[in-house]
Amino acid sequence: MTQNNTQATKEQVLYADVLEKGMYAGLLLMVITFALYVLRVIPPIVPRSEISIYWSMPVHDYLVAINTNFLHWETLPTGWSWVKLLGYGDFLNFMPVAILSGVTIVCYSIIAPGLFRRGDKAMGIMAIAEVVILSLAASGLLSVGH
């Protein structure tokens, strides 16, 4: 009969601590950026009175309409191009979402050295693979269908 170890490892606790802090930071930023948008402290690209017009549009049509009516860029605002628009209330709200999405990458990055020090090479390699795969996915370098 095998015994299951119900104690969390040092790396699991560290992962959970970093995840918790990142989640709370992202949530706090989400509340702050949304308040800045709703209270009109930072003006949006798309006027709030017009935003409901775009809700039912497919993504491509939405991007075309936003670009045509407000941005006037040579190319559609895709990928990480929202970063150029962080000075606007409606796009500032993307920042906490990106932070929340990236917390897992930070967690794996932080625990990987401890896994190798402990001699758990397989888990260390998997943690590094997670960092690489998630970073590539977030970078937009691995695009499909274009």
Image: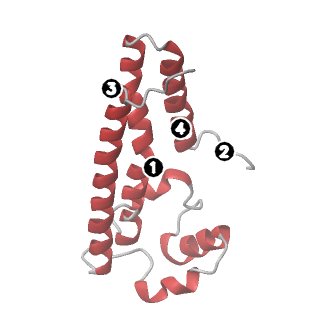
Residue in the foreground of this view, choosing between 102 and 18: 18
Residue 101 shows which numbered tag? 1
Tags 4 and 2 touching, CB below 8 Å? no
Question: Between marks 4 and 2, how big is the CA–CA gap?
Answer: 13 Å
Is 34 left or right of 57, judged from the image as shown? left
Residue 10: assigned label: 3
Mark toward the viewer: 4 or 3: 3
Tag nearer the camera, 1 or 3 = 3
Secondary structure state at the residue bearing disc 3: helix
The image position of residue 82, as x and y in percent, is 46, 58
Percent position (x, y) of residue 124?
A: 48, 19
Instruction: Name the residue beneath numbered marker 4.
Output: 134
- Quarter of the figure with residue 137: top right
Q: How many marks?
A: 4
Residue visible at 26% across and 81% down in the picture: 39
Element under disc 4: helix
Tag 2 or tag 3, which sits nearer the N-term?
A: 3
Mark closest to the chain's N terminus, 2 or 1 = 1
| Residue behind mark 2 | 143
Query: How far separated are the C-alphas under marks 2 and 1?
Result: 18 Å
Mark 3 vs mark 2, CA separation in Å: 36 Å
Q: Find numbered disc 2 in the image and state the secondary structure of the residue it sits on.
A: loop
Q: Give coordinates of residue 13: x percent, y percent.
A: 33, 33
Foreground mark, 2 or 1, reads 1
Q: Amino acid at mark 3?
A: Lys
Please report whichever mark, 1 or 3, sits nearer to the chain's N-terminal start.
Answer: 3
Q: Which residue does the image show at 64% across and 68% down from the upper left?
A: 59
